[in-house]
Amino acid sequence: MRFLLTCARRLGRPRRAVSQILLTQLAIAAGVAVLATGLFLAPLGAQLDDQAMRRALAIAQSAAADPALAADLLRSAPTPDGPVQVAAERIRRATGAEYVVVVDLNGIRHSHPSPDRIGRPVSTDPGDALAGRDVMEIDEGTLGRSARGKVPLVAADGEIVGAVSVGIAYDSVRARLLGAIPGLLAYAGGALAAGALAAYLLSRRIQRQTRDLAFSDISALLAEREAMLHSIREGVIALDRAGRVRLVNDEAARLLGLSPHSVDALAGRALDDVLGAGRTTDVLAGRVTGRDLLTVQGARVLVANRMVTEDGGAVATLRDRTELEHLARELDSTQGLIEALRAQDHEHANRLHTLLGLLELGLHDEAAEFVTEVAGVHRSTAEQVTERVRDPLLAALLVGKGAVAAERGVSLRLADRTLLPDRLVDPGDLVTITGNLVDNALDAAAGSAAPWVEVELRAEGRSAVLHVRDSGPGIPAGHGEEIFTEGWSTKQPSALRERGLGLALVRRLAERQGGAVRAGGTADGGAEFSVVLPEALR
């Protein structure tokens, strides 16, 4: 009972892919062997029949060519010891034929292996041979089934006087056919064994590649993989060993800016052709190694990881860090503002103490003058920015950066040529670009004597032009282009976020609007960054 239950469980399980393939290949090999054997035996039987009939015909023609046989037929009676019987038996024994029968024009036998049948009519019609035609056939006679050859017997004067019929026993033909079968089966068996061995070796290889799974399991895994790949919020790109794209899921297409409708057409294309040259391509192709590598694609900051597969290909994952980077930058700005507010609070307390002292001393006019002076300084700074930078977002950014700069002891000023009307099509990118460049300039200038940062914003037709200059040490020699590469930075790594993305993001944002970024130096040895955004103004 236990054995039956075990068999039932095995039968109920999905058959492994390797087992199905092996059985299928063995069945195909056996079928081919049987078919080949049948295809060989079928024409072989017909060929042996034809050979037997031609042999019988040749013997009959050779016997009929003897003029003495025709002469003996004309002058002797059909008797068992007559000259025709003697000659026919001699030919039969010499050739191994089953019979050699000579008949006259009346169809009466003059020779036969059974002497008692001499003088009797033949069992088959000799009409065709007596009419002068050669005959080859397989037919049933008094001695059984045989391959026959019949020819006319012609006298010296050219007259047909009878016929010669020679038969080859069909059993001998069949014996030759059966004798060929063992050798044929040996060849077929050898071919089947070779096919079985090849099938086994192939199935073992397939077993390793399919991890010994059933076809239903493989189908289920593929369906689950497709559902998982296209539902997760992480980009996945699979590459083969030559760097050609195998698979791109929906999230990867979104992060890389690829059209969702063209994803299927990407299979088999080189990664360089799909994404073009750049850090993102280098990271995904493995030319840049490491974990959690940062790269900028379009306006997105991506984190990439790459794992090599067993077949020499690779699978790369992408995560969107854009929002996190923005939050980190906002946190940096917020911390700077908090520090600035703390300093202003301290400064405000000192001013209140000064004002209180003036009032207690009765110096009311001096107190009023002090309040007017302090209020005028703050008002003039804000008014100067808003009068020359009309866009409220940019103005607010510069006022806030001014407070941060004051706290850090850096003078943030507007260039005399600064004048930007409130006609920006989309101020978001320009705000990001300005904030990044000002932050970098403040960091660079902070360590110099009499530090300063100068911002110039102006309109040239419909283009917005930005210059940010500082009193820092300037751009390292020979690094004019390298500073725009993701990951390049002279700052110490931060615990909050990766360094080396600001300038790369600035260039990407500028290029996205058809603009350009250029790095240079000031007359004092500091750095100057220039940005031109065409069509930025209405």
Image: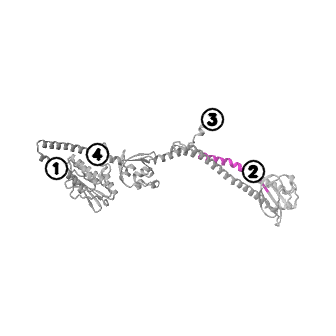
Q: Position of residue 456 (x, y in %)?
A: 24, 56
The answer to which of marks 2 and 4 sits earlier in the sequence is: 2
Quarter of the picture containing the N terminus is: top right
For marks 1 and 2, give the one nearer the viewer.
1
Left or right of 114? Residue 443 is left
Judge whether 423 appears above or below 337 on screen. below
For marks 3 and 1, give the one nearer the viewer.
1
Left or right of 302? Residue 41 is right
> How crowded is the residue under tag 1: few (<14 C-alpha within 10 Å), some, or many (20+)?
few
The answer to which of marks 3 and 4 sits earlier in the sequence is: 3
Residue linked to disc 4: 332
Q: Residue at x 27, y 44 (%)?
A: 335
Q: Position of residue 526 (x, y in %)?
A: 22, 52
Range of residues picked out in magenta: 166-195
Judge whether 44 appears above or below 353 on screen. below
Residue linked to disc 2: 172
Classify mark 1: helix, strand or loop. Answer: helix
- The span from disc 2 to disc 4 (Cα, nearest Å) is 106 Å
